Amino acid sequence: MSKALPMLALEGAVAGAPVIAVWLVLDRVLAGDLTRPFAVAASGFVALCILMFVFANRLSHRVLWQVQSTAVSALQARIARQMRRIPLGDVIARDTGSLEALMSQHSAAINFVTPPALAMRAMVGPLLSAIVLFFLDWRLALLTCAMVPAFGVVMVFADRVNARMLQRLVVSNEMLSARLLDYIQGLPTLRSLGLSQAYGPVEDALETHRRISLSTVTALMPIVTAGWIFLDAGFVILLAGGGWMVLHELMEASTFLLFLVVSLVFYAPVTDAFDLSSQLRLLQKSMSRVGEFLAIAPLPEPETPKLPVSLDLRFQDVHFSYGDKPVLNGINLDFPAGKIHALCGPSGSGKSTILDLIARFWDVQKGRVTIGGVDIRDIAPELRSAMVAVVFQDSYLFDMSIARNLRLAKADASDEELYAAARAACCHDFIMALPKGYETVIGEGGAKLSGGERQRIALARAFLKDAPIILLDEAAASVDPETESHMRQGLAKLCAGRTVIMIAHRPSTMRHVDQRIEMKDVLGRDDR
């Protein structure tokens, strides 16, 4: 910025300099003594000003765009880190559209290009013009600036309207983004229900956004028009007052002509203040949304991490609630290392919550969860992450190649390691049958694969991570019998010698478990 601002100031200064040359040429023309050398010199001066303007503009904007791209990228990376560090509930409680807006809209609203350029153009040119005008004739200079205070009052009012209206516009834009994402993701369901032509939430969001956008423009246009009228009135005052003074021989006609020409340079950039106000208010609202998200307290990490002495898992007097809804009330559980443990019970009984607490997606409100006698909050995050692998009921795959999806678990994994993990998860054969094998891009969410294929790749990812603690959240609950058979083979290999905690309903799943935990209103245990 320190390099760009002087260039912006130079740009603003030379933007109005050709007007001086025009005045000098007109003065010579009116006096009848314009010479060729003078006209050539004036033309050369104008050409020099244009070259300086282009040079200053190019250099300043190159620097500003570098600052802009660096700042936006850094902020987006910080938001992404915050999403990984805060409790998962604080993330999923927000609309997908608002989260997308944080990353793509609000963070990108940091504008180091337009506001500085507008500010310099609105200040430097008029300020230099005012200095020249007061130097030539203070009387006409006062007439030129007569309506500036009134314009300032209009600007204050416009800024307040901007602050009020843009807040509503930002919120409606987030809601529209959320509803559009819902519509796109749910399009197959909507088509099956015959609703693809009309979907109420999207239509309501579009209408709300249209109404708020229109009301914003409607509220601002009279104010902007008033500002223009005041500035035009200033030119009328200059024209009338200066003409009267020339008629009464109180000043030279050439001086009056200069004021008429320079006033154009004086007034034109001032109107950029309207755009500057809108830009700054929009930036303020966007940064407020980003600031609110970054202010969410992350999960605390230990200053002096401790090392677990074993892989035994234990819940000690654990309490946990989702808002005002209690889920776990002082439960005590033991999960001995190297055993397979099954959590059974109806929906909402806390099974998934137990897995989430072990993975530390949330922290307990009371009590503690330990691994090897150490509270998981006292274990270094890198070690804790390496110790636990999770296979969800509907695991997410990213819009990239299968190989890159697998290497999320182990970035430096060799091809041979990928193949071994895929074979263990019974998915190597179908991967090799794809057009590009492991380099096949599988679409957002793995949309180009079947549900069973996605689950087996997620299982291969867990194999590749090679964590000693495995959490299975109904990993085979929604697949067909043939796929389930393949997954059972893979799960048997994955669970061997590891501490496994699974959510299970099917008898076939619980056939070989070492401990079965029935979760009801009060936790019971039936060891096997």
Image (cartoon, rainbow, N blue to C red):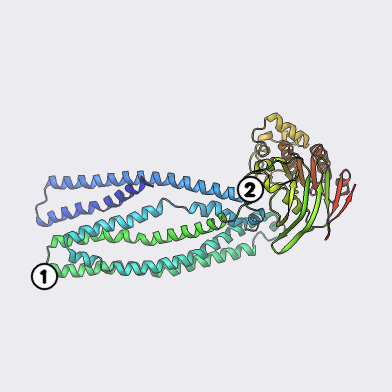
Q: Which residue is mark 1?
A: 248
Q: Between residue 409 and residue 242, name the one nearer to us.
A: 409
Where disc 2 sits, the SS reads loop
Real-space Cα distance between discs 1 and 2? 82 Å
For disc 2, the marked residue is 301
Image coordinates for residue 246, horizontal then vertical, percent:
13, 67
Q: Residue furthest top?
A: 416
Residue 315 horizontal side relative to residue 108, left or right: right
> Which circle, 1 or 2, is nearer the viewer?
2
The amino acid at mark 2 is: Glu
Q: How many tags in the picture?
A: 2
Name the residue located 45 percent from the left edge and 61 percent from the top edge. 281
Residue 101, percent across and down? 56, 55
Residue 220 falls in which quadrant of the image? bottom left
Residue 14: horizontal and vertical position, in percent?
Answer: 27, 50
Q: Secondary structure at mark 1?
A: loop
In the depicted structure, whether residue 327 falls above or below residue 402: below
Q: Is residue 211 above or below residue 188?
A: below
Dot 2: within a 10 Å radius of its alpha carbon, few (fewer than 14), some, or many (20 or more) residues?
A: some
Mark 1 crowdedness (10 Å alpha carbons): few <14, some 14-19, many ≥20 = few
Horizontal relation, residue 166 to residue 223: left or right: right
Q: Amino acid at mark 1?
A: His
Q: Is residue 138 left or right of residue 118?
A: left
Which residue is more in the foreground, 266 or 313? 313
User: Which residue is found at the position 35% from the left and 59% from the top?
Assistant: 272
| Contact between labelled residues 2 and 1, with CB atoms less than 8 Å apart | no
